[in-house]
Amino acid sequence: FKKFLTPAGNEARNMILTFINRDFENPDDRLAFDNLLKKEAGYRADAINEIGACGMGQALPCSKMPCALSYDEKDLECQYAWIKAYVERRYNTPTLAWKFHLDNNWY
């Protein structure tokens, strides 16, 4: 992955992994979800890229996601819930979202 996890990103990842393990039975979906968040923003809750996509999941526009860009526990939970709903609505599973990302370099 191009982006390396910062200490805050690593702490956020540890928290989010508990949600991923709770919500997805399929190990491929768990790995795919983790890969998406590592690839998109390195689990940086405060990430904003050059075109204005923001958060761990790189919501575009940022206003789509009703969460603060902070490492506060409630904001991390909000970002996770938003990303999970987006992935399930658009791709059905994290595995299919990751496949799309690998083929297109975005999701």
Image (spheres, grey):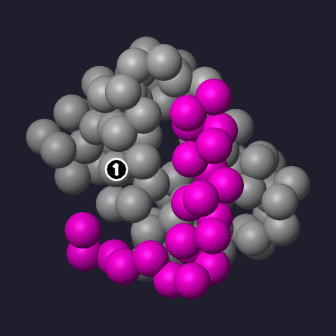
Left or right placement of residue 20 versus residue 26 in this view:
right
**Residue position for label 1:** 35
Residue at 36% in and 79% down: 4
Question: Is any atom of residue 61 visible in this view?
Answer: no
Task: State which quarter of the image contains the N terminus.
Answer: bottom left
**41 shown above or below 16:** below
Give the main secondary structure, helix, strand or loop, of the magenta stretch. Answer: helix
| Nearest to the observer: residue 7 or residue 2 | 7
Residue at 77% in and 47% down: 78
Residue at 42% in and 40% down: 33
Q: Quadrant of residue 71?
A: bottom right
Circle 1: element type:
helix
Q: Position of residue 99 (x, y in %)?
A: 21, 33
| Nearest to the observer: residue 94 or residue 62 | 94
Q: Position of residue 86 (x, y in %)?
A: 55, 32
Task: State which quarter of the image contains the C terminus.
Answer: top left
Q: Quadrant of residue 10?
A: bottom right
Q: Is residue 11 magenta-colored?
A: yes
**Farthest bottom residue?**
7
Residue at 52% in and 65% down: 43
Q: Is residue 14 magenta-colored?
A: yes
Left or right placement of residue 31 versus residue 74 in this view:
left
Q: Amino acid at mark 1?
A: Asn
| Nearest to the observer: residue 60 or residue 18 | 18
Give the magenta-colored segment's residue range: 1-22
Q: How many marks?
A: 1
